[in-house]
Image: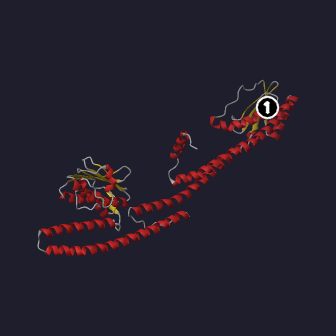
Amino acid sequence: MKLPSSTRVFIRWFKRRLPGTLFGRSLLIIVLPVALMQIAVTYVFFDAHWQTVTARLSEGLAGDIAWAVESYKEDPSPASFAKLAERAEESMGLSIALQPGRQLPLRRRDPPVLLEAFFAPIDRSLDRALTDRLDAPFWFDTTRYPAYVDIRVGVQGGVLRVLAPRERAFATQGHIFVLWMTVATVLLTTVALLFIRNQVRAIERLANAAEAFGRGADVPAFKPHGAKEVRAAATAFLDMRGRIQRHIEQRTALLASVSHDLRTPLTRLKLSLALAEQTKRTADMKRDLAEMEHMVDEYLAFARGEGGEAAEAVYVRPLIEAVSEGARRLGAQVTVAADPELTATARPNALKRALANLVMNAASHGERVEVAARRAPGGALEIVVDDDGPGIPPEQHEEAFKAFARLDESRNQNTKGVGLGLAIARDVARGHGGDIVLDRSPLGGLRAVVRLPG
């Protein structure tokens, strides 16, 4: 059954206003039912118990007042009234006074606005009880005196005024019940806050450890905490981290051996060519050998991923200046705009290699290169590399990041490369918890933006 559009809009609006954190949602799940239960219990108490008790008390008070009025009507003499007032004071706690020549007030006094909802049920109960028991006109006020209820009954020759203790008219302990309910709610909420905060903190520690490991940083003090399920997830994370680290160590050792094995014959070939007669053929062989050595270096760098390097706080501008010198030696005009105090938590050699790939790529395809580093909103670090080269069509931006990708257009003029520069740079950025995106440069060529977490 398809819901109406207005209902779907309301559901989306409601979901957007729900807490987004686990702590907020857990608190809502626990506190909301408790609050609803307390409200329901309070309502039932006042509706079923408190009002019933108040009605019974009002009926009892109305009966006593009716007795006093009937007794006065039977013998209105001063001596009889004095005896009546004395008996009412001693036996019923009622203070009765005769006001000759007085009349009943025309209207009742309105209770304070904040207390209107509290006094309205009391007034209704007392009014109903007095109406049932009295045949004479009456007037009462439940708000003028803090400890008494003022009730006046019209009699022949004046008004019979009765001051009754407030507890005779209604149950005065209702606020105590509300107070206890409030204290219980606050206490339960506080206990829920403590337990939820403790459980959420364990999940936050696990998330922080996973994020730090993804950036290449280590968290040696991390240990499983929290509920059984959270500890199981943390233990699984530690096992996974150990397997990944062992894999990286084994791969690094293997690559070091392969690098040594490949460089040994290359070195012998270079020595043989250096000792051979220098001809056009040997010159061509030297160029091929240099290209082969460069390709081996790129393959090993891509596979290694600088995985064994520890992350540390580094100044960004010196890294940019160092890689820019290489681009300037190629003849490119390189300008650098970065705060000397700008820092980033990164693996220095890996970040330097990524920036070198981007800057050298820009210098190879353009004559003018601009490199800028800045803090983005939210604290992230952005390093922007612009060039005035031919650029890359937007539909090929993602293709350019694939390993060994060689674009067929004008940016494929660098025959020395093997299509790993951008792949290595993005791998390094993502290894730091960031990314690299490509865009159109204001200089007319390609813009590469490196984003790293702050």
Q: Residue at x 70, y 27 (%)?
A: 107
From this viewpoint, is residue 314 visible? no
Q: How many numbered discs sit on the rendered protein? A: 1
Label 1: few (<14), some (14–19) or many (≥20) C-alpha neighbours in 10 Å? some
Coloring scheme of the render?
A: secondary structure
Q: Position of residue 2 (x, y in %)?
A: 56, 43
Q: Quadrant of the N terminus?
A: top right
Q: Is residue 34 above or below residue 222?
A: above
Q: Which residue is mark 1?
A: 131
What kind of residue is marked 1?
Thr
Q: Is residue 113 left or right of residue 158?
A: left
- 314 or 121: which is nearer to us? 314
- 262 or 429: which is nearer to us? 262
Q: Secondary structure at mark 1?
A: helix
Q: Position of residue 384 (x, y in %)?
A: 29, 52
Q: Residue furthest right?
A: 74
Q: Is residue 96 left or right of residue 257?
A: right
Q: Is residue 289 left or right of residue 178?
A: left
Q: Quadrant of the C terminus?
A: bottom left
Q: Position of residue 165 (x, y in %)?
A: 75, 39
Q: Residue at x 40, y 66 (%)?
A: 218
